[in-house]
Amino acid sequence: MRAITSEGNTEIFYLQESYTDSTGFYVVYAPLDEQALLALSKGCNPDNVIILPSGFAILPGGLPVKGEGKDRGSNTGTGSLLTVGFNIIDWSITNETPITLESVQAIYGVIADTVTAIKDAVQYHNRLNNWMNEE
């Protein structure tokens, strides 16, 4: 995946891994700038490159709904459990300085935007009756 940037800005690429089966779904990704990606492709020691993986997992959830389906009382509930994880570096924070309000607001914005995007994607697939191809 490649981010489109304006002239003079750093280009960001994303390494991504995803997996899905009947027990859940996950996506793990890590942003890398162009210089880090080039260094790795030329055999640079990967210990010298900062890679901060982030991602999310969606697991089936909800309580059993009695009276639905062939197996009454089976786990045919609705809903999901969403777990989101981020690795973020704020270079302005040291051991002596507390986290700033601006940093908290930026992190909150990233989390809120990510959860909203995931929720919108899941709702879109559910509306098309295409989520996990259940029959």
Image (cartoon, helix red, strand yellow):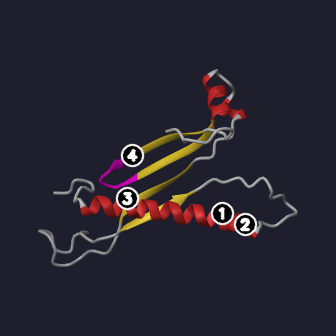
Q: Secondary structure at mark 1?
A: helix
Determine the residue positioned at 20% across, 78% down. Answer: 66
Mark 1–mark 2 Cα distance, whole angstroms, equals 6 Å
Mark 2–mark 4 Cα distance, whole angstroms, equals 34 Å
Left or right position of 25 against 1: left
Mark 4–mark 3 Cα distance, whole angstroms, equals 16 Å
Q: Secondary structure at mark 2?
A: helix
Asked whether the residues under the numbered discs 3 and 2 touch, taking CB atoms below 8 Å apart as contact, a structural biologist would say no
N-terminal-most mark, 4 or 3: 4
How many residues crowd around disc 3 within 10 Å: few (fewer than 14), some, or many (20 or more)? Answer: few
Give the amino acid at mark 1. Ala
Disc 4 designates what residue?
A: 19
Determine the residue positioned at 29% across, 53% down. Answer: 22
Asked whether the residues under the numbered discs 4 and 3 touch, taking CB atoms below 8 Å apart as contact, a structural biologist would say no
Quadrant of image for the C terminus? bottom left
Disc 1 designates what residue?
A: 106
Left or right position of 84 against 129: right
Near-viewer residue (75 or 124): 124
Residue sitting at the far right: 96
Residue 98 figure quarter:
bottom right
Give the amino acid at mark 4. Tyr
Residue 132: image location, x then y, percent: 26, 54
Asked whether the residues under the numbered discs 1 and 2 touch, taking CB atoms below 8 Å apart as contact, a structural biologist would say yes
**Which disc, if any, is residue 121?**
3
Residues in magenta, as a range: 19-25
How many residues crowd around disc 2 within 10 Å: few (fewer than 14), some, or many (20 or more)? Answer: few
